[in-house]
Image: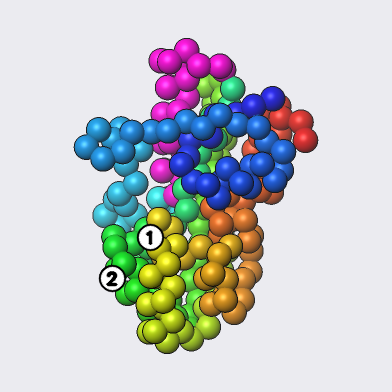
Amino acid sequence: MRIHLASRSPRRRELLGQIGVAFDTMIFRTGERADPETDETPLPGEDPAAYVERVARAKADHGGRIVGWRRLIAQPVLAADTTLEFAGRIIGKPLDAKDAEKILGELSGKKHRVLTGVAVHFRGMTEYALSTSEVEFRDMDQEEIRRYVATGDPLDKAGAYGIQGRAGIFVRHLAGSYTGVMGLPVCETANLLKRMGWEF
């Protein structure tokens, strides 16, 4: 059994491999030719949980349509979206290095929530699950933030950090799913696939 993975994330590919899920990567267009169905821009006043559900479902559903249009092998399409909630705000990927430093400075010494929504579309039906984790950072000084941002690691990650990399040294406490903070909660993902007939 295989799935279509509607994501560019190397972390998601790695995590699927760890739980024995074979997949074919489905890449959506980006930039000026990006599909409007996969737009990750939050709506005004949108709740973080509603945001990740909307985006994950939209990607999975659009992936399902692409399977039909391109006459690809009929197998489940898995999509996910991760965001941070801090002080009532949705925090996505940083715009640039300066923005990454600003985000990490705000998170220093404080708690935030990481929400990852996972959606699986198959045979006209979409199933969804949400993973919510609480992460607390220790106090970080501006110089170590600057050095971390200079590695380039934070620039493609929600909240400007990847817990599985060097940023792990900033995490004082985590309550929830480590893999959910990475970008794909494997427990919830496996349960969704089992509901679609997958056998582990």
- Decide: few, some or many residues near mark 2? Use Cα within 10 Å; few <14, some 14-19, many ≥20: few
* Disc 2: which residue: 98
Q: What number is the disc on residue 155? A: 1
Is residue 123 positioned above or below 53 on the image?
above
Query: Depth check: 129 or 161 in front?
Result: 161
Amino acid type, label 1 = Leu
Q: Please state the extent of the stretch shown in magenta in the rendering.
A: 52-74
Amino acid type, label 2 = Lys
Q: Residue at position x 44%, y 81% from top?
A: 144
Asked whether residue 30 is drawn in magenta, I would say no
Is residue 132 positioned above or below 58 on the image?
below
- Residue 70, x across and y down, in percent: 43, 15
- Residue 145, x across and y down, in percent: 41, 78
- Residue 85, x across and y down, in percent: 43, 65
Q: 65 left or right of 73?
A: left
- Secondary structure under the numbered disc 1 in the rendered image: helix
Q: Residue at position x 41%, y 43% from top?
A: 55
Query: Depth check: 157 or 119 in front?
Result: 157
Tell me where residue 75 sits by quadrant.
Answer: top right
Q: 185 left or right of 18?
A: left
Q: Residue at position x 35%, y 68% from top?
A: 100
Is residue 76 positioned above or below 175 on the image?
above
Q: Earlier in the sequence, mark 2 or mark 1?
A: 2
- The secondary structure that dominates the magenta segment is helix
- Residue 194, x across and y down, in percent: 71, 34
Quarter of the image with the C terminus in it: top right
- Decide: few, some or many residues near mark 1? Use Cα within 10 Å; few <14, some 14-19, many ≥20: many
- Coloration mode: rainbow
Furthest residue toward right: 200
Q: What number is the disc on residue 5? A: none
